[in-house]
Image: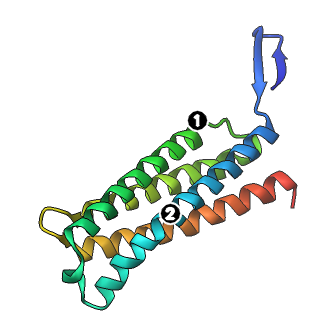
Amino acid sequence: MDKRVNLERGIVLKKPNLGYYIQKINDIVTTSEEIGELMNPSYETIRTAIDSKKLADLTSEQLKETKELFMSGTDKYRTLLAEIKGLKAPVKVIGIHKKLEKSFETYVFGCQEMVDSINVEETSVNQEQFNTSETKQDEATDEISFCIQRITQLVMGK
C-alpha cells in the first residue's frame, strides 16, 4: 500500500491499493456467479413446479436437498458480503462501493427468504415468499451489476 505521512499529526495514512481492490471485486463477482450457477437447476425445478401448479409433485427429499443447497449458497454469499464490507475502497469509488455493499446485503436477505420459503417438514413452498424473494434478488442483482459497471468506469476513467 502507498503511504502518505501527515506531518502535522505524525500519522501515516495508507492509500487503498487500486489493483488489489479491483481484483477482489472481480473475484467476488466470479465466485458469486459460480454459486448461482450451482443453485440454478434446483431453483428452476421449484420455479417450474410453481408455474405449472405442480408443487405437490416435489418430494420431501427434493425439497430437503434444495433447501440445504440454498442454505449453503446463502452462507457463501454472506462470506462474500463480509469480504465486500472488509474492502478498503479507493476514494473515487467509496460512494458506489457503499451502494454495492447495500445491494449485496439486500441480495443475501432475498436468498435467505427463499431458503425460508421451503418447508421440508410440510413438503411445501410458500409461493408468495418464494416469489417475493425472487423479485428482491432480481432487483438487487440489477443494482449490483450497475455498481460493478460504475466502479469499473470510475477506475478506468471512462
In terms of image quadrants, where is residue 129? bottom left
**Which amino acid is tagged 2?**
Leu
| Residue in the image at 58% along x and 59% along y | 34
- Count of numbered labels shown in the rendering: 2
Q: Position of residue 54 (x, y in %)?
A: 24, 87
Which quarter of the image is occupied by the N terminus? Answer: top right
Q: Tag 2 or tag 1, which sits nearer the N-term?
A: 2
95 vs 5: above or below: below
* Residue 87 x, y percent position in the rendering: 64, 37
Residue 70: x %, y % from top left: 38, 59
Query: Could you say whether the residue bearing mark 1 is in a helix, strand or loop?
Result: helix
Toward the right, the furthest residue is 157
| Label 2 Cα crowd, 10 Å radius (few <14 / some 14-19 / many 20+) | few
Q: Is residue 91 left or right of residue 156?
A: left
4 displayed left or right of 44: right
Q: In front here: 16 or 50?
A: 50
Foreground mark, 1 or 2, reads 2
Up the image or down, 55 lies above or below 117; here it is below
Q: Is residue 135 visible?
A: no
Where is mark 1, residue-wise? 86
Residue position for label 2: 38
Q: Is residue 60 left or right of residue 107?
A: left
Which residue: 77% across, 15% down?
A: 12
Q: Amino acid at mark 1?
A: Gly
